[in-house]
Image (cartoon, grey):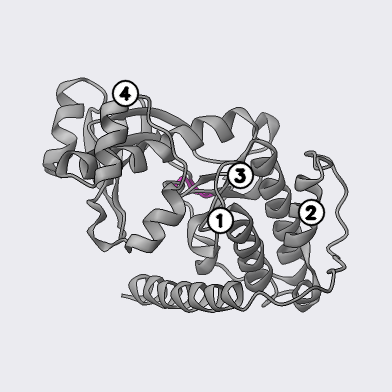
Amino acid sequence: MKPPPRLQSLIEEGLIDTVVRQLMSGKEAMVFVVRCGDETRCAKIYKEANNRSFRQAVDYTENRKVKNSRSARAMAKGSKFGRQEQEAAWQSAEVDALYRLAAAGVRVPQPYNFCDGVLLMELVTDAHGDAAPRLNDVAFTPEQALAHHATLVAEVVRMLCAGVVHGDLSEFNILLAHTHGADGGEGVDVPVIIDLPQAVDAAGNNHAQRMLLRDVANLRDFFGQFAPELLHTDYGPEIWNLYQAGLLGNDTPLSGRFERAHADVDMQAVLREIDDARAEDAARRLRMASAAA
């Protein structure tokens, strides 16, 4: 196919040989399947941030640091240059998170390069070598649901131990990849976490706890459709409590139970949670409508 203008510079630089096809177009980016020598990869072209709400941008970008003091001042003032720098920081956040999480052993696509607002990374595939499906496109047995839920809770813990909270984790941004067994033996399906431009620093963002609890609740609610016993688990608060106490490690055993302390109700916090739940539900419905289109 004819390469999009945003990919032409990567072709001229020799980073991409050919563009095979468009894989998807979402609210934040367009993704294309590309050939790089003998390998098939994907190129993620970031869109402008016009469709992201200001409140979400503030929540996700809180305390994100930029090294250039001029850029930091411009971002604080909200000037045109500052908005451009803020968008660049938003895009590079996914690149930084991918490298950080890949190094920590989290199952994410392997990043290869970031150039002119385009992220070049691994194409996650199924057993036939085609692009892997999202979880929301797959039905599971109760046993499969329990296994994949346990795997993803462990991945959330591994991410948190690496200092990262995904911030928007759901069945819409987890792929079900196929890994081939040793010596060509039978492989297994494993979840791979994608879409990290909204990832936040666990220690430096005041919204990190709320985002992590929502991420884990999304996993519980999705897999609970196939294994209802998961709907009675409470991994999110347990994980965060262990993290805050300095007791969380990659191999820390979890029970899925958490005893909440009784305290005075913070009504403002409750109202914020209601607003966030409504916004999340609206975004989920939009993603479902886009997927069905």
Considering only order in the chain, which callout, 1 or 3, is on the residue closer to the N terminus? Answer: 3
Considering only order in the chain, which callout, 4 or 2, is on the residue closer to the N terminus? Answer: 4
Callout 2 environment at 10 Å: few (<14), some (14 to 19), or many (20+)?
A: some
Q: Nearer the viewer, residue 230 or 261?
A: 261
Distance from the alpha carbon under mark 3 to that under mark 2:
13 Å
Find residue 19 and report its image quarter: top left
Q: Are marks 3 and 1 in contact (CB under 8 Å)?
A: no
User: In the figure, 145 relative to 212: above or below?
Assistant: below
Residue 189 appears at what percent x and percent y?
Answer: 64, 51
Q: Residue at x 57, y 52 (%)?
A: 206
Residue 87 left/right relative to 225: left
Which residue is denoted by mark 3 in the rendering? 202
Q: Amino acid at mark 3?
A: Ala
Q: Give the secondary structure at mark 4.
A: loop
Q: Is residue 93 magenta?
A: no
Q: Give the secondary structure at mark 1.
A: loop
Identify the mark at residue 241; answer none if there is no mark.
2
Q: Give the secondary structure at mark 2.
A: helix
Q: Nearer the viewer, residue 136 or 80?
A: 80
The span shown in magenta is: 125-130
User: In the figure, 185 relative to 262: above or below?
Assistant: above
Q: Are marks 4 and 3 in contact (CB under 8 Å)?
A: no
Callout 1 environment at 10 Å: few (<14), some (14 to 19), or many (20+)?
A: some
Considering only order in the chain, which callout, 1 or 2, is on the residue closer to the N terminus? Answer: 1
Which residue is denoted by mark 1 in the rendering? 207
Residue 97 left/right relative to 286: right
Which residue is denoted by mark 4 in the rendering? 37
Distance from the alpha carbon under mark 2 to that under mark 4:
47 Å
